[in-house]
Image: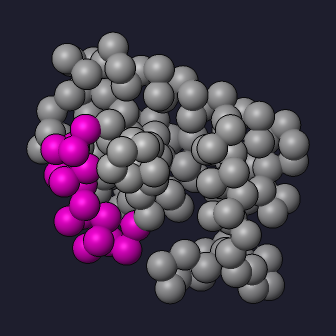
Amino acid sequence: MQISNTLKRLTAGIMISGSIIYSGTVMAADTIKVGVLHSLSGTMAISESTLKDTVLMMIEEQNKKGGVMGKQLEPVVVDPASNWPLFAEKTRELISQQGVDVIFGCWTSVSRKSVLPVVEELNGLLFYPVQYEGE
């Protein structure tokens, strides 16, 4: 599946002395934290809950194969509740407080546009799973 291949490409990155380099910062980690940013409530929940389930399934499958670079993937799921400004707040929380290494999320253009300034400010990494706009 595409998410599994994306995780493989993502984590084929740089390893230095057992540490991972993301956004110019060296972090020792037993797991790779993966943020999942899809609405689980509100008007978009009907579409985005399935996306959350798909990401969790792909993480589980990858972990069964030994994870990535010998590290297990650890999902961190948040619910932006179909509230576009809340997407930005939850993105900040995922990167700053939860310490995720990557985020898979957003389903609409407006949610992506809401989180983009935060991702750029905090040197985060967002995979936006919409074939006609992001991939």
Q: Residue furthest top?
A: 46
How many numbered callouts?
0
Viewer can see residue 130: yes
Image: magenta residue range: 108-124
Viewer can see residue 40: no
Residue 25, placed above or below residue 30: below
Q: Residue at (69%, 51%) from the top-left corner?
A: 5
Residue 102, placed above or below residue 4: below
Image x and y of residue 37, in percent: 38, 40
Residue 33, placed above or below residue 107: below
Image x and y of residue 61, in percent: 77, 34
Q: Is 121 left, or right, of 29 in this rendering? A: left
Q: How is the image coloured?
A: one colour
Residue 48, placed above or below residue 126: above
Q: Residue at (21%, 45%) from the top-left corner?
A: 109
Q: Quadrant of residue 77?
A: top left
Q: Is 126 left, or right, of 122 in this rendering? A: right
Image x and y of residue 44, in percent: 25, 22
Quick one: 61 or 96, which is closer to the camera? 61
Q: Residue at (31%, 28%) from the top-left corner?
A: 39
Where does the N terminus fall, quadrant-wise?
top right
Q: Quadrant of residue 56?
A: top right
Quick one: 100 or 132, which is closer to the camera? 132
Image x and y of residue 48, in percent: 37, 25
In magenta stretch: residue 116? yes
Majority SS type along the magenta span: helix
Quick one: 131 or 34, which is closer to the camera? 131
In magenta stretch: residue 110? yes
Q: Residue at (25%, 50%) from the top-left corner?
A: 112
Q: Is 113 left, or right, of 78 in this rendering? A: left
